[in-house]
Amino acid sequence: MSEDDERQQSPPSDLDFVSTKARNCNATGSGSAYPDQVLNNVLENVLHFLTSKRDRNAASLVCKSWYRVEALTRSELLIGNCYAVSPARVTARFARVRALHLKGKPRFADFNLMPPDWGAHFNPWALAMAKAYPWLEKVHLKRMSVTDDDLVTLAELFLGFKELSLVCCDGFGTGGLAIFVNKCRQLKVLDLIDSEVTDDDTDWISCFPEGESHLESLIFDCVECHVNFEALERLVARSPSLKKLRLNRYVSIEQLYRLMIRAPQLTHLGTGSFSPSEIAGQGDQEPDYVNAFAACKSLVCLSGFREIIPDYLPAIYPVCANLTSLNFSYANITAEQLKPIISKCHKLEVFWVLDSICDEGLQAVAVTCKELRELRVFPVDAREDSDGLVSDVGLRAISEGCRKLQSILYFCQQMTNAAVIAMSKNCPDLVVFRLCIMGRRRADHVTGEPMDDGFGAIVMNCKKLTRLAVSGLLTDKAFDYIGRHGKLIRTLSVAFAGDSDIGLKYVLEGCPQLQKLEIRDSPFGDAALRSGLHHYYNMRFLWMSSCSLTRHGCQEIAHAMPHLVVEVIRSADEEEMDTAAEILYMYRSLEGPRTDVPKFVTIL
């Protein structure tokens, strides 16, 4: 590679900028710019130590000089909405970017509330980055539409590309993956998480280059097709730096064993199906799964367990004492099957599980897991009229036993104010509290009262709270509590809750840090929408679906706030309506309305 090629594949250095400035100064015969350059050099060295995105954003607002220098030292970009700014504006401001984090659709798209083909295309970003940052090493995308051609662009135009993470993305298939992994010879991370990957009948695993691999993380548990296991086994064997491996459900427990004995250095493991293959011979001697897990002495994070046969669970006993993260969110196991495992997990900090463990299982967690920081309890059956397997009993037990809890997501069918109040007092360090009562507008199942006082206690007693999800029978009183005491709340989710427009008014007028507000199936209408005019420019987005909005009310917001993009969305097969607004998605943008608007979206 020539010297010019090498320079093209690395960002301009500080020396490049200094020498250019010096030449300009000498040309004019003046040295007056040198003091400024010295200050800029000092500032650059200081800003290199700023890693928090909020600190960097604050630094860029000090003055024009800080704005310029901060842009020159920014190597990692996080863009929370791909339509908030254009690729051209980004590349014009930031000259040395090595890593891009980009988000597309709003979160409610995960619940099929947004029609497919809405947008969030990665293609214009990929092409712009290729021209501006040929040295780009990392791309992390969330809820973006990514095509096979985009993957080819990443592989062919970024010669030193190392990390790709696709979370909740779609639009690509195994054919694109095959080309990507074959051409990215320095690839360290390929994480496919909750993404939709089309099966193109392409053996993508065998397309990794031969020879020693640089892979440190390989996650493909969302890929719903068979993989070439022999190729996967060879890849794992020649990847000495591999620390994270998450397998899909087509990898059996016998195959898992073969991979584990070739990669005892793993720290994070997703087990695949955790059941035998259908073609395993009945007379074959089973591998020693217990010893295979025991040999993985660095294992701290365990997940997978798809299509689990509980009889194999004792195999993980040897690693339980070291685990800090355990994900059973695909394992339909009972409390009795959980207890022998959880009783050994004294270091556990993150635990995801299905409600099949019932309150009894949560009580076992509370007895052992004193270091727990994050708990997520998902429903086996998410229907509104399903039988609730966990309740206020389990929530209260967790609050009493896991006092260091910082984040909880809890799906249930019935709850009490007393249990929520107890959690607010026992776990005052909560940063995230998401309680999803799946039945619509359900009251305290003991007293019959609204759930106002429970959520009120959360916002009053948990002073660090930044994310809140509310549900159940709520009156304006609950939203008054949130507006009065939720001064640090940045994300608020409301589902099947609310009393009148004044409730939303309390929130919009009382929560100065609010960035993301998502509401579904609630009674809020145009008057509630208008009450946030003073704050919308400070927010990242507002989502409202199946509420009481009218098209005219949305049009008023669009006229009053021209720098806000106001999208009214209907289902793809629905005729355009003149009155009701079924879905409103509103976000700030430096660019104005987007150009890739599908027919079912109207920008007001």
Image (cartoon, grey):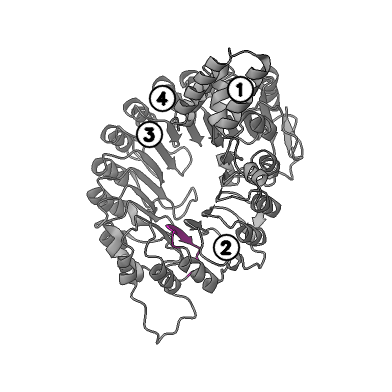
Tell me the amino acid under the disc marked 1.
Ala
Q: Mark 1 points at which residue?
A: 22
Please identify, in this view, whether the residue under mark 4 or under mark 1 is nearer the observer: 1
Label located before the other in sequence (3 or 1): 1
Q: In this view, does 569 lie to the left or right of 166?
A: right
Front residue of this view, candidates 31 and 475: 31
Please identify, in this view, whether the residue under mark 4 or under mark 3 is nearer the observer: 3
Tell me the amino acid under the disc marked 3.
Val
Q: Which residue lies furthest to the left in this view?
A: 367
Front residue of this view, candidates 39 and 583: 39
Residue at (69, 42) in percent of width and height = 119
Q: Mark 3 points at which residue?
A: 431
Front residue of this view, candidates 115 and 289: 289
- The secondary structure type at the circle numbered 4 is loop
Residue 347 x/y as whole percent: 27, 50
Label located before the other in sequence (3 or 2): 2
